[in-house]
Image (cartoon, grey):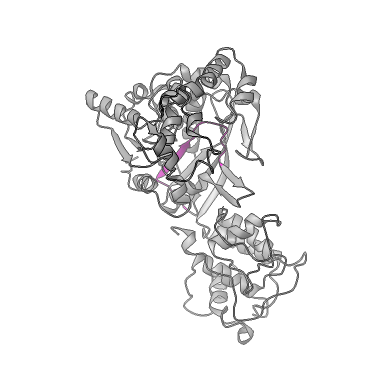
């Protein structure tokens, strides 16, 4: 099953009676059915663009679960727009939903039920298909009892059957990796359901911050919820590729915005590029002990900071990867990256994007006050031109942001020098994710990434946007030229005009497409698999 979104059809039963019976402990409510199906099929995303059911709002119990079902189409609601989450779901309704969800084939013969004439016409085909696959069953007298409530036992058995048949598309397994110093790394392995041998394994190498193997994001005000890494897991497993990701050292799943991650600061101090690079080596070794993955080619997919760690794992710690894919490539040492980001360069570049003058060295007062994207009030708080033109030269330039940001930058570097984690936590939380002085110092010890990259001989691919404000595209051109000078031919560079540091992930999330992500998934799918 390539993409479940194409399969999720409506549970709206326009013909036939609408159930108004409230669920009891012995049978299953529509809410319970939705939650269990969402979990089984990894249905999670809500984008805030969907019209809510008429009988719930953002404060409703399980709002996101119900709306995830609606977004994916297998629950549409009744004709009055309601979901009636506490009402029972009948066996006939459940059969139709499960059938539509999985696009089951029609059996050659039957089955024929003793009460077939009593079954609703809109459900007969679906009932036959789910019974033929052993997902639901008739009673000892051959009756399906379509109008009866679906019981919890029925649903449990249905989910077990779906999993045994590998019909849920993707299976997730929580793994514990024992790393070099006895530290246990928690991770999530996603595999194509039912596959006994898998020839490609992608290991996601995180960007900066307290990341989990889900990277859940949720906004209760706007009604948006998604798991960043589910997008990768769904796409890779649909093409037969396994996908692994992990919790950063010192991090576990949490329940609070913005990171939905709990931080153990004593352990989080161990989060350094060198330690994570070594963790990657142990991940590969132990995941390859899984019989399904024993012959798999290993692809390290590094994002942002991960574009430093992935080649480091191979070149310095002997991680046995076969290919590197690097998204939002950072070529400079982290000290230089921070000099750029906090020295005014990143801020000014972002302003050139906001005012439609990308690549310009200045923004005039006229260009600013024209406000082509209407963001002065909505995004910048109505700030006047003169309050940004700090050197009063009649232009907004990088020098203005240098004046603005220098005290922050100098304060950070002083705190790093003094091991002052408290200052960083109190003063940098609105600018960057939580980080410890150990992380900064460990990064400062590293060479430029291109110096690490030149020691790597396996195939490498860079995917970079020209509007990357975090790590400028010039770094990609620099490493590309370095490889040409050295006569190395194992680097392929992909540049995307107008794409940001995240390679326009938001477009992908909202179904608008991202050529960069399409190329990433396609590159993995069509990699030449080594003969092992």
Which image quarter is the C terminus in?
top left
Magenta highlight range: 195-215
Indicate left or right for 52 with 464 as reference: right
Task: Give x and y (percent) for residue 218.
Answer: 60, 46
Task: Give x and y (percent) for residue 100.
Answer: 52, 69
77 or 383: which is nearer to us? 383
Picture quarter containing residue 373?
A: top left
Which image quarter is the N terminus in?
bottom left
The correct choice, above or below, for 361 with respect to 47 in the image is: above
The residue lying at 42 percent from left, 45 percent from top is: 372
Task: Give x and y (percent) for residue 212.
Answer: 57, 38
Task: Give x and y (percent) for residue 177.
Answer: 55, 33
Q: Residue reaching furthest top? A: 418
Magenta run includes residue 320: no
Magenta run includes residue 199: yes
Mostly what secondary structure, the magenta segment? loop
Picture quarter containing residue 49?
A: bottom right
The residue lying at 55 percent from left, 31 percent from top is: 209
The correct choice, above or below, for 58 with respect to 302 in the image is: below
433 or 316: which is nearer to us? 433
Indicate left or right for 111 with 479 as reference: right
The correct choice, above or below, for 389 with respect to 202 in the image is: above
Q: Is residue 300 visible?
A: no
Q: Is residue 462 visible?
A: yes
Q: Residue reaching furthest bottom? A: 117
The residue lying at 77 percent from left, 64 percent from top is: 25
Picture quarter containing residue 349?
A: top left
136 or 83: which is nearer to us? 83
Indicate left or right for 513 with 279 as reference: left
Instruction: Count how many numbered circles sit on residues in the image.
Output: 0
């Amino acid at each position: 099953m390539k993409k479940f979104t194409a399969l999720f059809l409506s549970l709206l039963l326009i013909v036939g009676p609408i159930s108004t019976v409230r669920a009891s402990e012995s049978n299953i409510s529509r809410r319970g059915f939705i939650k269990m199906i969402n979990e089984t099929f990894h249905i999670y995303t809500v984008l805030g663009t969907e019209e809510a059911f008429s009988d719930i709002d953002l404060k409703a119990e399980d709002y996101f679960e119900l709306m995830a079902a609606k977004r994916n189409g297998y629950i549409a609601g009744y004709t009055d727009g309601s979901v009636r989450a506490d009402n029972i779901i009948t066996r006939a309704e459940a059969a139709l939903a499960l059938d539509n969800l999985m696009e089951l084939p029609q059996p050659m013969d039957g089955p024929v039920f003793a009460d077939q004439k009593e079954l609703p016409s809109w459900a007969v085909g679906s009932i036959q298909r789910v019974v033929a696959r052993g997902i639901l069953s008739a009673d000892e007298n051959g009756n399906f009892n379509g109008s009866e409530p679906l019981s919890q036992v029925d649903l449990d058995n249905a989910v077990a059957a779906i999993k045994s048949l590998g019909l849920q598309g993707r299976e997730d397994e929580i793994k514990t990796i024992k790393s070099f110093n006895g530290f246990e790394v928690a991770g999530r392995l996603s595999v194509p359901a039912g596959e006994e041998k898998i020839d490609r394994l992608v290991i996601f190498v995180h960007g900066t911050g307290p990341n989990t193997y889900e990277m859940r994001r949720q906004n209760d005000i706007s009604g948006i919820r998604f798991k960043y890494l589910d997008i990768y897991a769904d796409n890779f497993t649909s093409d037969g590729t396994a996908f692994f990701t992990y919790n950063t050292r010192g991090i576990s799943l949490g329940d609070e915005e913005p990171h939905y991650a709990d931080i153990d600061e004593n352990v989080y101090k161990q989060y350094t590029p060198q330690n994570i690079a070594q963790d990657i080596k142990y991940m590969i070794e132990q995941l390859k002990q899984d019989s399904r993955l024993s012959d798999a080619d290993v692809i390290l997919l590094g994002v942002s900071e991960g574009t430093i760690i992935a080649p480091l794992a191979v070149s310095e710690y002997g991680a046995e990867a076969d290919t590197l894919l690097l998204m939002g490539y950072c070529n400079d040492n982290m000290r230089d990256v921070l000099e750029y980001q906090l020295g005014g360069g990143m801020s000014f570049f972002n302003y050139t994007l906001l005012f439609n003058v990308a690549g310009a060295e200045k923004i005039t007062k006229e260009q600013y006050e024209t406000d082509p994207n209407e963001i002065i009030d909505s995004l910048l708080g109505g700030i006047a031109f003169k309050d940004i033109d700090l050197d009063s030269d009649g232009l907004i330039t990088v020098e203005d942001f240098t004046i603005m940001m220098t005290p922050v930058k100098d304060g950070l570097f002083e705190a790093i020098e003094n091991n002052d984690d408290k200052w960083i936590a109190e003063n940098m939380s609105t600018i960057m994710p939580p980080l410890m002085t150990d992380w900064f110092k460990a990064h400062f010890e590293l060479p430029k990434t291109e110096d690490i990259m030149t020691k790597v001989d396996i195939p490498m691919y860079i995917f970079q946007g020209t509007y990357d404000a975090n790590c400028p595209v010039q770094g990609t051109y620099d490493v590309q030229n370095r490889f040409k000078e050295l006569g190395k031919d194992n680097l392929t560079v992909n540049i995307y005009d107008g794409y940001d540091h995240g390679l326009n992930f938001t477009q992908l999330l909202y179904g608008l497409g991202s050529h960069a992500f399409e190329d990433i998934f396609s590159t993995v799918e069509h990699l030449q698999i080594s003969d092992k």
